[in-house]
Amino acid sequence: MKKKIYLIIAAALLTGTVFTSCSDFLDAENKSAGGQTADDRFGADATQYLTATYNSLKSIVYNVGLYQQGTDLYINTRGKAQGSYNEYSLTPEDNGVKSLYSNLYKTINYANGVIYYAGEDSPLSHEARFLRGYAYYVLSQQFGGVPYITTYINDANREYPRNSLEEVYTNLIADLEDLYSSSTLTDQRHDGRASKQAVAALLAKVYLSAGWDLDAPYNNVESGTYSVSSTSRFSKAAQWAETAIHNVALTMSFADKWAPTNEGNAEEIFSVKYQRAGFPGNVTSGGHSQQNNYGGYYGECLSTCMKNVGSENAQSEKAMYLFDEGDNRYEATYMTSMYNATDKSNWGTEGYYAYYTASNRDNLTMAYRYFPWYVTEAQAEAEFAAHQAQYTKGNCINDVIAVILTLPNVIKYTFNADGTYSKTTIDINAYNTQTNNGVCVKKFDDPECEQVTGNNSYRDIVIFHVSDMYLIAAEAYLMAGQTDQALAKLNAVRNRAGLPSLGSFSEYVQPYAVTGAFQIRDLDVILDERARELYAEGYRWMDLRRTKQLVRYNVEFNIYVTNARAMMDVTGTDYKLYRPIPSDEIEMNTAMDNTDQNPGY
């Protein structure tokens, strides 16, 4: 694998790769390397190599399959196959696993290249060390122990032994703490570049994960029980989370936090930046598809003026009931009102994105209206009566439909030409085979996107933000035995969402159904809050793995996992608690063999 990395880098340098991104710093010029060597090109100025390192994050920060699937919150609908990530049938030959592993090491070697050319103590290298640290954090969460490499690979050496997970954590923490205390990084930045606040956020997550992995061994995998042998790493995680919070109070509304016009706001700590203006390639395919992956299918976007969503990673039954009445995050997370269009050419001003561009949404005709589980039929029908013109199709493209998303049967309203309607109840499983089956996530919407099927969003992808750090602190305080501090951080998040404070963890009543075997614990309260606050952001699988709830939550909530045996190897011996080490790595790395493969594979 290391030889592969070297060949990738060498090819990029010899062919004059175009490195592009959003800020002035990251917009490196397009050069032809000609007869230049890497030493010629980067020996005097490694800025362009750092640009490549930042850009390489784009291949690792957004991975729906490996970061979200196989958890409690998402399902595939309308006949979409469940896939190997949801059913835990992936193998060491899985292309998604191989790609993530390779891309993470590409970021690491790019960062090591910056350090090699710029010098360990240069400002460029300080940023590179943060990016390298982030890649190692993801590797540790997905794969466990991995080869920890801090030297630039510019030869064909293929011998890199696998370090233990404890060695990875120890080295990573030492490097990041030194980076925080001795670097030239600025305290805060909101322009896609590293800062001390970002280093603190990363340290909080690394310390928290290390505490779980090294100091809280399993008592029982299926029940998600554990014993805490030491609280020191959890206390350090809480301290670093407080540092990352940087005294930022949660005064901004959740809707404003995720508004398309408010990127780089005070709660953002570190993001991967995208910019449509000035993009040097095909702008319709040069972005990403984060806005297109969480929800039902609303028809071909070229014909319906709806957002293109592919019926993958839609709301699970637990997610449908996750938000209580009064939680303002529901409307800020999901698109509950999708407006109609009179002509398919009116993309952006009519149809789905009219939500963002129309001056008066009350004058727009509805296409699809989705009510959460706690809305009654009487309340929905009162809205229809008060806004009858909005529920009259007229000359619009799409039929008008409204749904109350309840279990086990949804309530579906189909509107006639005159605004009257018929009402039916549909079993949730049958409903999930239909088009327009449920809400989609809107918090990543890019209203300026082109009318194409995907990869045309240029919203920044947020990696670290302040409310995440509040909940990291809450979890760390809980594990350190500081319950009052944990509640304080949890309640700050709840209060911003419009929910009352909890006087104790035992006061919490989950809004979704569980079996008698699933008893709500203090940790579950924090995990539920993370599910609401961070829905669709790409944390869930790592959250469940870290907290030792992966098997327990999948058995209880994942419709594709019928029992714990489904998450074990073919012999029923080992659980699949990490991703497999790619077979190519084991084959090509002369310091690794099949004994280095993760349990379960």
Image (cartoon, helix red, strand yellow):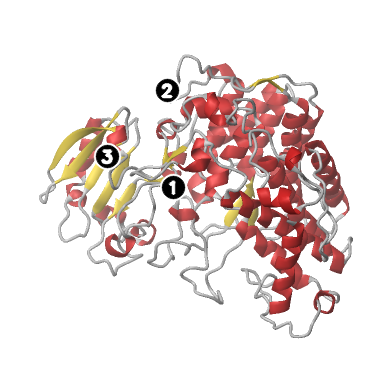
Give amino acid for label 2: Ala
**Residue 210: x, y in percent?**
76, 35
Q: Position of residue 587 (x, y in %)?
A: 72, 51
The residue that disc 3 covers is: 403
Per the image, the residue denoted by label 1 is: 294
Res. 417 in view: yes
Q: Nearer the viewer, mark 3 or mark 1?
A: 1
Q: Residue at x 15, y 57 (%)?
A: 394
Image quarter of residue 167: top right
Please identify the quarter of the rendering in which residue 514 is found. Answer: top left
Label 3 Cα crowd, 10 Å radius (few <14 / some 14-19 / many 20+): many
Disc 1 and disc 2: Cα gap in Å?
22 Å
Residue wearing tag 2? 513
Say what secondary structure mark 1 lies in. Answer: loop
Q: Secondary structure at mark 3?
A: strand
Task: Answer with the quarter of the image where residue 358 lies.
Answer: bottom left
Q: Secondary structure at mark 2?
A: loop
